[in-house]
Image (tube, helix red, strand yellow):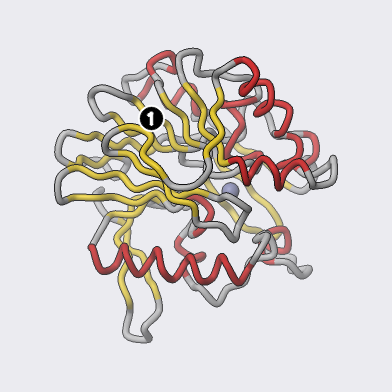
């Protein structure tokens, strides 16, 4: 099986693409490091048979103005919309979109412009409230008008905590990176897979002691990261890493030094 797909009983999971970004390490870790970091955007499609659920929605057609100069977006023919076709689906087929939080690299195609005409978009109310209090040049704040018009027009629903989106797809609030940041558990029978979003977005981010310059509440992020990864280790669940540029479907384990470590699966 290709490394970008996974089956859990009757549920099919496809990891899609929305290009890659390059940024200074300092933008992610804080400080003023000159090193460049590369990340991918890998929205996830969950086909339960009755429903087609998209987890996060990339940058959208273009890099937002507020990130120009700090982020470089690279796409060959691999924007999210092309990726749908390659996977044998179309944007019209999507029934539900879960936004883990409101950063620009997660909400793009869902809000600017809304690209899934038959889908309901799910956002935690706490994420919206946090975004409303941020400065105008913050990308989370810039997602507010999109979410609010979605609520008004009936295609966006605000959530208050954990719940089931459709049978087999459940969200769980694990804040720290953002208020109301939500992760997703995909379950079929005894099997489950985990989408960590920006709680643990790439292999290098599995170290709970790596305090990120972009976490709203680093202590909460650290605690939640440990608890969630521990659960993935114990249950031997596949984990999907949204920003991992090479092999985003992984298994997480504890290594000899008792640190979390991820190994790509499939291929
Ligand atoms: Zn992100």
The residue labelled by disc 1 is 53
Image side of residue 237 versus residue 139, left or right: left
The image shows residue 26, relative to residue 242, as above or below, that is below
Name the image quarter holding the N terminus: top left
Can residue 245 be seen in this snapshot? no
Identified at 59% across, 19% down, the residue is 114
Q: Nearer the viewer, residue 47 or 147?
A: 147
Residue 142 screen position, x and y as percent: 75, 35
Residue 159 screen position, x and y as percent: 52, 38
Identified at 26% across, 57% down, the residue is 237
Q: Nearer the viewer, residue 118 or 124?
A: 124
Residue 160 screen position, x and y as percent: 53, 43
Quarter location, residue 90: top left
Identified at 65% across, 64% down, the residue is 217
Identified at 56% across, 25% down, the residue is 156
Mark 1 closeness class: few <14, some 14–19, many ≥20 residues within 10 Å: many
Image side of residue 14 versus residue 97, left or right: left
Element type where label 1 sits in the image: strand
């Amino acid at each position: 099986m290709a490394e970008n797909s996974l089956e859990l009983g009757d549920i099919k999971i496809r990891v899609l693409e929305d290009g890659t970004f390059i940024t200074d390490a300092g933008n992610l870790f804080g400080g003023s490091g000159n090193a460049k970091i590369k990340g991918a955007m890998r929205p996830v499609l969950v086909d339960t048979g009755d429903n087609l659920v998209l987890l996060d929605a990339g940058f959208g057609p273009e890099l937002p103005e507020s990130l120009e100069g700090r982020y470089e977006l690279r796409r060959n023919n691999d924007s999210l919309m092309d990726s749908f076709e390659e996977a044998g689906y179309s944007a019209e087929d999507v029934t539900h979109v879960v936004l883990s939080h409101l950063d620009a690299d997660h909400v793009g195609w869902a809000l600017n412009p809304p690209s899934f005409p038959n889908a309901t978009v799910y956002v935690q109310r706490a994420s919206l409230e946090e975004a409303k209090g941020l400065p105008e040049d913050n990308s989370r704040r810039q997602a507010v008008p999109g979410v609010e018009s979605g609520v008004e027009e009936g295609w966006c629903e605000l959530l208050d905590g954990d719940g089931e989106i459709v049978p087999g797809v459940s969200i769980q609030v694990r804040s720290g990176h953002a208020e109301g940041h939500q992760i997703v558990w995909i379950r079929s029978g005894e099997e489950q897979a985990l989408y960590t979003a920006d709680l643990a977005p790439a292999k290098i981010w599995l170290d709970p002691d790596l305090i990120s310059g972009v976490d709203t509440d680093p202590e909460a992020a650290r605690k939640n990261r440990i608890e969630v990864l521990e659960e993935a280790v114990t249950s031997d669940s596949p984990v999907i890493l949204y920003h991992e540029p090479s092999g985003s479907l992984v298994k997480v384990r504890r290594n000899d030094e008792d640190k979390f470590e991820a190994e790509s699966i499939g291929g």
